[in-house]
Amino acid sequence: MLFMVLGRGKTGSLVAKVASERGHGVRVVGEEENRNAAALTAPVLAGFDAIIDFTTPEAAVQNMRACLATGARMVVGTTGWYQHLDDMKALAQRRGGALLYGSNFSVGVQALFKVAGELATAAHGYRFSITETHHATKKDAPSGTALTLKRIIEAASPGISVEIASKREGDVVGIHEVEARSDNDVLALKHEAHSRRGFAEGAVRAAEWITVKTGYWDFEEIVGQL
């Protein structure tokens, strides 16, 4: 398979490395080559099985508009753009493309989502909070992962409101902590990423999965099929 990776940042570069290790051809396109999605023309995109985006929220929206308009298949690991999600889904459907998005492509984080939902279902009457810590250059806050945790917990325990505290420190890859507190005790869940490789492997496996698909999905929905 031949994949295009958008973004030369730490995660994008690692995605390209993992894809190559898994036997795929890879072309990496950086921001300087792709301002306003200028590199994403229909003739260029036609040669790729899937496009993987790890850029910025602003760039990702432009990239999706350009790619999905040609019926391309995209995996988007960038977060902070979900206010445009309905538009992107509609574009993918209208053009016969495919969009797979997710707040976190780590299989470990997907397990955290599942356990957090189960905890919220079981711990009635507890007060929930989320703390997320990321590197100082992360542009969106709260993180997409923290917002997903909030959605899952609130859906599992209707009527509660979950507060999120965001921290930006050094080169922290990603730490997400869920706390359920009562007057009698505290329950805590924690996921700490030691490297970006878990995100990169999940994104590449997602790209492999989407190459023959049409439609749109949250990574949560299909992770069990990988």
Image (cartoon, rainbow, N blue to C red):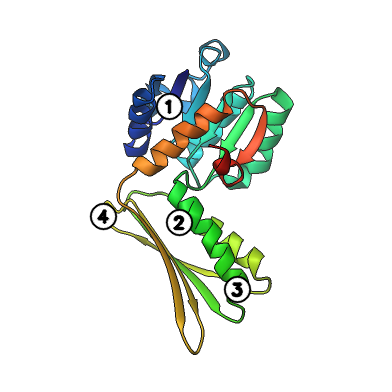
Q: Is residue 153 visible?
A: yes
Circles 3 and 2, Cβ within 8 Å, touching? The answer is: no
Q: Nearer the viewer, mark 3 or mark 1?
A: 3
The CA span between labels 2 and 1 is 24 Å
Residue 114 x %, y %: 55, 58
Amino acid type assigned to the residue bearing label 3 in the image: Ala
Q: Residue extending furthest left?
A: 170
Asked whether the beta carbons under mark 3 and mark 1 sit within 8 Å of each other, the answer is no
Foreground disc of the pair 3, 2: 3
Q: What type is the residue that disc 4 sits on?
A: Gly
Q: Of the two numbered discs 4 and 1 on the same chain, state the one appearing first in sequence.
A: 1
Query: Badge 4 is on which residue?
Result: 170
Q: Nearer the viewer, mark 4 or mark 1?
A: 1
In the rendered structure, find residue 122 and report the number of the disc placed on it.
3
Q: Tag 2 or tag 4, which sits nearer the N-term?
A: 2
Dot 4: element: loop
Label 3 vs label 2: CA separation?
A: 28 Å
Q: Which mark is residue 5?
A: 1
Location of residue 222 (image quadrant): top right
Q: Nearer the viewer, residue 110 or 69?
A: 110
Label 4 to label 1, Cα distance in Å? 25 Å
Residue at horizontal 63%, vertical 29%? 98
Q: Earlier in the sequence, mark 3 or mark 4?
A: 3
The residue where tag 2 is placed is: 141
Q: Are marks 4 and 1 in contact (CB under 8 Å)?
A: no
Q: Earlier in the sequence, mark 3 or mark 2?
A: 3
Q: Amino acid at mark 1?
A: Val
Q: Residue at (46%, 76%) from the top-left corner?
A: 187
Q: Earlier in the sequence, mark 2 or mark 1?
A: 1
